Image: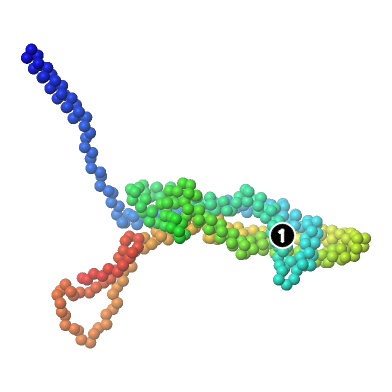
Amino acid sequence: MILNLRSLIVVLLTALMLVTAGCASKAPAPQPPPPPPVTISEATWQQADRDIVAASQATTNTVKDYTRRSMRVWKDRVYQLTESDFIPWFTGYWTQQWLTMKVAFYKANSGEGKVPPEKQLAVYLQEQYHQRVIDPVAKEVNPDLVMEQATKLYVQLLTRELRGIAQRYGLPPDQFGRRLSDILAIELAPPPKHDASLYQVIRAEPLEQLPAYVVLINKIHKAAANTAVAAADASISTVAENASKKLEATLAPRGIAGAVSAAAGKVAGAMISIATAGVSVLMHRNEQPEMVDQLRVILNAALDKEWRNEMENPTTGVNAGVLYLSGKIEANLTKTLTPPVEFQPPPQAVPDQVPEQGGSDEDSGDETCVISGDSKGVGASPNCSAY
């Protein structure tokens, strides 16, 4: 009995040792210490900054090709509708008669402190040109939307280039992200949320979620609208005013005849109107080809000017958003690439008598002051050392 008890105890101890050994073998192995942070030299960061500037410039040129192609389509469609719709309408006989009545009405109601007749007619012709040409074309190619799409395309392409730069130099994502966070891409504060770093811009999906981007786009649209109002819609208004002045001069006799017809009474007025209409038809047939040619020249010249303005104006054109972002990014990066400025001490005047040297050797020596600061030139302050 005692032997069996001892055997049982031995068996239980053996089993307990096996279980303990099994648990010990399943214990997790100690984790290796985290790798030390990757150290990127300042020279590497400087080269990465230069690559970002180059990438921004190349991306800007690529996006300009896109906007140029889009706006050529817009320009061609405006040409087509001008030729097929507005010019036939404007030079048509019955349109000319209607405009004659408007000129006569404007003249009858003109006076000191009132809008001149040619200005009033210019507004009417401008409205007609927009309704017949500009608005229909905008349904196909809208310069405002081209500007927004170009800005988004710039951000998209630059983001891809930035990924390549990080891989090229082995830049850790967290360190590269902090570097991009120090580069302001939008500076429209206050309030602070109207500023955005390059990191915030490339991380925003969609861009409309970034308040600074929305403010920037609205600012460009507002500037374009204000420019159009201030310049009386620069291109089309110029066309309308020139055309209305010419129209007023050529249609003045017909306007007088119409006024005489209205004053002569119903019967006599009707006879005068018939005679005037017959003469007007003949005059119109003779004048129409020249009128068409002159109007075509005026409109096409104004359209060419408008197209150039859309392509080249850095604050209101279709490249305005791209030029703003690229300009800010490149300017802020250029600051980090500018080497510190070294100031030499001013020449010392030679005294008549050299004073006796005093003090310890540690207190003597010349001083030179060098502007020191961080790698971006921020917080620079003079640092004087003796040697």
> Measuring 46% from the left and 57% from the top, which residue is drawn there?
194
Q: Is residue 13 left or right of residue 52?
A: left
In this view, the residue in front, 96 or 194, is 194
Q: Quadrant of residue 192?
A: bottom left
Question: Mark 1 sits on what residue?
Answer: 124
| Residue 312 in sight from this viewpoint | no
Q: How far across and down, in percent of the image, does residue 91 sit?
A: 76, 57
Residue in front for this viewpoint, 338 or 111: 111
Tell me what residue is drawn at x 27 percent, y 80 percent: 348
Find residue 31 and report its horizontal and vertical position in percent: 23, 38
In the rendering, at what x and y percent does residue 302 appear? 65, 61
Query: Residue at the location (63% across, 54% down)?
Result: 75
Q: Nearer the viewer, residue 119 or 372?
A: 119
User: Is residue 77 left or right of 172 when viewed as pictured?
Assistant: right
- Quarter containing the N terminus: top left
Position of the C terminus by quadrant? bottom left
